[in-house]
Amino acid sequence: MRRRAGLVLVLLLAGGSAGCSADEKETPPEPSAANFQPGADGAGDPYFPKYGNGGYDVAGYDLDLRYEPATGKLSGTATITATATQDLSRFNFDLSHLTSSAVTVDGAAATAVAEGTELVITPATGIRSGRAFTVVVAYAGQPGQLENKTLGNGGWFRTTDGAIALGQPESASTWYPVNDHPSDKATFRLAMEVPDGLEVISNGVPGTRETVDGWTTWRWTENAPMASYLSTVVIGRYRIATTTHNDLPMVTAIPESLPADGAAARSLARTGEITDYLATQFGPYPFAANGGVVVDEDEIRYALETQARPVYGDTFFSGGVNTGVVAHELAHQWFGDSVAISRWQDIWLNEGFATYAEWLWSEHDGQDTAEELFDQNYKAFNWAEPPGDPGPNRIFGDAVYQRGGMTVHALRRTIGDDEFFPLIKAWAADHKDGNVTTDQFIEAAEEASGRDLGTFFQDWLFSAERPPLP
């Protein structure tokens, strides 16, 4: 380089010119080795700093797996496409209970070391910022759960005849290498091989099935970006009903252990009707498939908005038909799934809107009105916990759900229906497939209403006292 610079100087002094080819002009210099740095071993979430990872952005996960119920062994490959967001010397995936046997980056062998619940990958050469790359991880083992005494265990549940992968705020890392934080949404494809006679239900659109030598491969594809905790697979003996609703595949599944015409089946049968009503309130349904899955495992006493196909614990239907929980999980397809949070502190944006959807559906279905449900909650609520900053141990607390729902209704009362419903439809449309924060919602509400709503949101989201009625 010194010799070339000297030549340029001589030519300029002689009245000449020094040129370079188009390739030389357009190709930036390679960064020095010192510029390549490890990606962070966490996404930096204020509540859960070590969830997820830094240094790259995942575009898609493509899983080709085999599960053996008799032994509990899961094996296969994960092909992960991503783009570096810095000059990477190495990077991490979240991976728990499973062991990688081979890793390649863009076809070249890479070094992979397990460090707790992290898989640390060092490629043969550094990856420049902005460059797309592909990682293939071959792995196997007996998947398990991520233990969390406060929030509840999540991850891979082995069942009598199969398995269920489910959980929030983290779960995906128990069955595939992943950037396990909702800020890094990605597409998802699954090919799962299981013994004949078992069904496999997952996210998105169902694909072709192949049976060879007593094993059947099921395929599912979710082409809309998805937060990793929303990915699921349910393996076992299920009655699957596949129909078409509004030109989209509608797939529902009920365990063979439950009555074919029982409360769970009758509740899920109204999925299309409830979706259609919510679309009148929130705008077009955001995904290419719909449906739901009921599971009958004692360990799963919750429902989760797994993308395009929520999963419901059967306890929700022990008292009869329950369309309220169906409305709640379907509302999440707009609020929580399509429009996902950037950090866990803002989970009220998911649960507050889903709770309010229950109230809207109740009124539409001829039961208590949204106003009546708001009044009931307002009179009886303990206001000590703020939903806008509940703390990491209370992200599933009543404040997030019920006070979050009250916040939504109070906003409606404050700005009026003529501004409220266009606001939430625009919010869902403007941020479709993206990530958001509470500050962004406050800004959107102020722009839509033309009002300063700082005091309103401070009272309803962040105060430890009863907010004044609007």
Image (cartoon, helix red, strand yellow):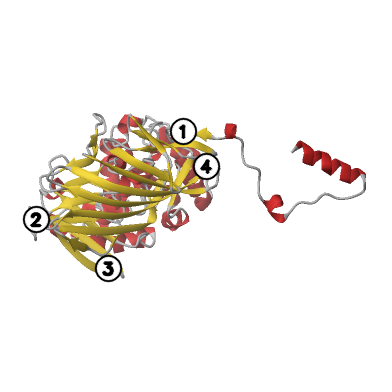
Question: Which marked residue is nearer to the observer: mark 3 or mark 4?
Answer: 4
Q: Alpha-carbon neighbours of circle 3 within 10 Å: few (<14), some, or many (≥20)?
A: some
The residue carrying mark 4 is 127
Q: Which amino acid type is marked by label 2?
A: Glu
The front one of 201 and 63 is 63
Q: Which amino acid type is marked by label 4?
A: Ile
The front one of 245 and 165 is 165
Q: Residue 398 carries which label?
A: none
| Real-space Cα separation, disc 3 to disc 4, in angstroms | 45 Å
Residue 451 image point, x, y percent: 52, 47
| Real-space Cα separation, disc 2 to disc 1, in angstroms | 45 Å
The residue carrying mark 3 is 245
User: What residue lies at 7% left-to-right and 57% top-to-bottom?
Assistant: 259
Q: Which mark is residue 40?
A: 1
205 lies above or below 388: below
| Real-space Cα separation, disc 2 to disc 4, in angstroms | 49 Å
Residue 219 image point, x, y percent: 27, 59
Residue 166 image point, x, y percent: 24, 44
Q: Quadrant of residue 46?
A: top left
Q: Which amino acid type is marked by label 3?
A: His
Report the quarter where the C terminus lies.
Answer: top left
SS class, disc 1 = loop
The residue carrying mark 2 is 256
In the picture as drawn, the residue positioned furthest to the front comes out as 3
The front one of 168 and 330 is 168
Q: Quadrant of residue 404?
A: top left
User: What residue lies at 47% left-to-right and 48% top-to-bottom?
Assistant: 133
User: What residue lies at 70% left-to-right and 50% top-to-bottom?
Assistant: 24
Report the quarter where the N terminus lies.
Answer: top right
